[in-house]
Image (cartoon, rainbow, N blue to C red):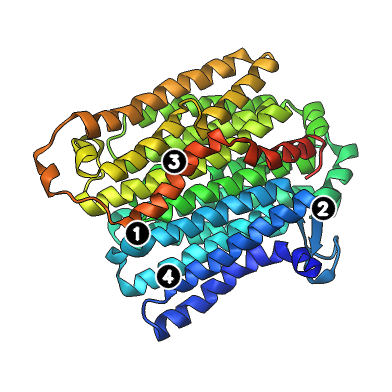
Amino acid sequence: MNDILSHLPILIVMIPISTAFISPLAGYLFLGWIRRIALLGLFINLICSLLLVLHITTSGPFTYHLAGVAPPLGIAFYADYLGACISVLISGIAFISIWYSSDSIGELGERKSLFFYVLLLLSVGAMQGTIITADLFTLFILFEILAIVMYGLVAIRGDGRGLLAGYKYLLIGSAGSAMILIGIGFLYITTGTLNMHMMADLLVPVSDSYTVLAGLALLIAGISTKIGLFPLHIWMPDAYAYAPSIAPVFSTLALKAGLVALIRVIFIIFGPSLAVQTIPLYSMLAILGAVAIIFCSVIAIRQVDIRKMFAYSTGANIGCVVLGIGIATEAGLEGAILLMITHATAKAGLFLCADTILIQAGIRYIHEFRGVGMAMPYTMAAFAMAALSMVGIPLSGGFVSKIIISSAAIASDLLLYAIIILFWTLLTAVYFFRILNSAYFEEADRVRTIREAPINVLIPIYLLCTAAILLGIFVEVPMGIIRPAAELLLGGGG
């Protein structure tokens, strides 16, 4: 059993990738089986992620060497509290989303649906690798795999808007990839290694080198493009709006994998003391996060397409996570990690609700939601739960994460950031409550022709939307692994 547990880091990466290679053959031989195979692969992946959490909480973080070859010649995966926590998040939401997808991707046709599932599985494998790799070049390769898959998911419909959105995503993503690669090159020239932990030790005596500073700047700029940090978010609205079915859910998860990479670059490679002594890195991140919160929230209010509203809302949440990272205290980092979890859960639930409403009623614009609360009471109830978590209503997951980050800002004499988070909460309430007001308190004639979603669609929706609330009530469950993750990272470890 211990031998199996020691191989969990590679298993959580290879299981979805192997399933992606197996599923097309099975899909051609046994029509309709591809979704079942994808579900089986992701279920096994979820079990492995949960076992990894159990193993790390009982035995502590550990390093896994691919093919048994240690760095600097070999490639290492580092399984720590942060990676294990986000691994469960990715595999769990991916499993629930593909469970939901049975009635939602018929528009793609049989052949494209097969490729759609393959791309989804590949994205899960790339995300799992991104969050546990301890090798910078492997991180770049996994980022590229994930990016190429996401370009395909956005453009897979083949219509004009989808292709244009995918092309815009490709151009901006390629610029980010180039910056990451050049930044890695600068750091490799300086240290002679690609292993994050070894690089961290070698950077200490040369932290003020212009080559090192350029490498740091390029890495952070490139990763900021991948996570959609304002103003590098311009690919997100169209990518979210025109991607089919559950693809935006996987895009949201990919952003979380990118945030984990950002945290590792900042806290493992450069370390808290190194970053503070060289440049005001944390202050810059906090400012960028605060600006993202304000601008993305204001723009979200102006949107008429619900998916574009979700995209800008995601941009604001990414900003708050970066703000929490920039506060650079254990409480700030704890709140940032918790917000990653609560946001991914609530936003996945909102996307599934919006997709269901589009399928059942043909509605995707906010002004069309009039009376939907009466015609689809169960779907809109789930939507309301996830929306309340996004706003930050007390006892919800979103509320607790915002409170932790705000308290960390106040404790660090950064009162302005706490005020910005409060202002953001009010803006979020504006654009979500207008939907709920329209759905529940306005009438529309065509409501009589709209039918509620079937039970097999509602079950996965309620799993996510209920979890968005329960994460606040039972917050000590995720905090049991988030606290040691923040403590280890602030100590300069992983």
- The mark found on residue 234 in the picture is 3
Quickly name the residue at label 1. 456
Q: Residues within 10 Å of mark 3 (few under 14, many from 20)?
A: some
Identity of the residue furthest to the bottom in this view: 29
- The quadrant of the image that shows the C terminus is top right
Mark 3 residue element? loop
Mark 1 residue element? helix
Q: Is residue 293 visible?
A: yes
- The mark found on residue 59 in the picture is 2
Mark 4 residue element? helix
As measured in the structure, the alpha-carbon distance from the residue carrying label 1 to the one carrying label 4 is 15 Å
Q: Is residue 191 above or below residue 485?
A: below
Q: Are marks 3 and 4 in contact (CB under 8 Å)?
A: no
Tell me what residue is drawn at x 22 percent, y 46 percent: 363
**Mark 2 or mark 4: which comes first in sequence?**
4
Judged by depth in the image, the label closer to the viewer, 1 or 4, is: 1
Mark 2 residue element? helix
Q: Is 254 in front, or is 161?
A: 254
Quickly name the residue at label 4. 35
